[in-house]
Image (cartoon, helix red, strand yellow):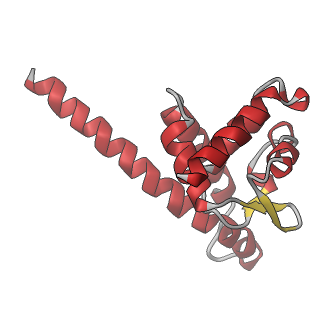
Amino acid sequence: FAEVISLTFATLSLEADDDDKSGGAIELLRKMAFLHPDKIPADLFTADEWVHVSALRKHSLVVDSELEEVSINSHVQDVVREQLMGGSRKAVLGGVLRALGDKMAAFDPGNVATHKDARRFARHVQVAASHADEVLEVLCQRADEALRV
């Protein structure tokens, strides 16, 4: 419960922040909610998206883990997925999966030079895919319901 209250105040602060009138920080937070919480790499996002990480840092929603990477508390991710998606859950998750797909496309098991980058993204792919399974399950249930009426 404390995480919900803290996150609510932080997101209200983000919305009111003069540096983030576009809502880019909240959009970045939504995307991060579908990734592994540790070592989220900057190069998974566009420069225009990553610029908003400073607002997330300012409100203690992410912390630096390594150069050009941040980590986010998994409880914050849970609350963002449950409370701050609005109707954008599928669109946000789809965008995250596409970005991860683009990064993993360069992986070649026979080319050692591609292994390091693939490993950087692999945990994020696994977590995002687990959320995609949830979305697909709900979608299939809705389709089954539609066919019964």
- Outermost residue to the left: 148
Q: Position of residue 125 (x, y in %)?
A: 56, 59
Horizontal relation, residue 131 to residue 136: left or right: right
Q: Position of residue 104 (x, y in %)?
A: 64, 59
Residue at the image position 13 percent from the left and 25 percent from the top: 147
Q: Position of residue 135 (x, y in %)?
A: 39, 42
Q: Position of residue 59 (x, y in %)?
A: 80, 47
Q: Is residue 56 above or below residue 144?
A: below
Query: For this rendering, which residue is in front, 35 or 74?
Result: 74
Q: Quadrant of residue 14?
A: top right
Query: For this rendering, which residue is in front, 122 or 80?
Result: 80
Residue at the image position 80 percent from the left and 54 percent from the top: 43
Residue at the image position 16 percent from the left and 33 percent from the top: 144
The C terminus appears in which quarter of the rendering? top left
- Outermost residue to the top: 149
User: Number of callouts in the render?
Assistant: 0
Q: Is residue 122 above or below residue 91?
A: below
Horizontal relation, residue 117 to residue 148: left or right: right
Horizontal relation, residue 108 to residue 15: left or right: left
Residue at the image position 44 percent from the left and 57 percent from the top: 130
Query: For this rendering, which residue is in front, 4 or 116?
Result: 4
Q: Quadrant of residue 47?
A: top right
Q: Residue 34: in sight, yes or no?
A: no
Q: Residue 130: in sight, yes or no?
A: yes
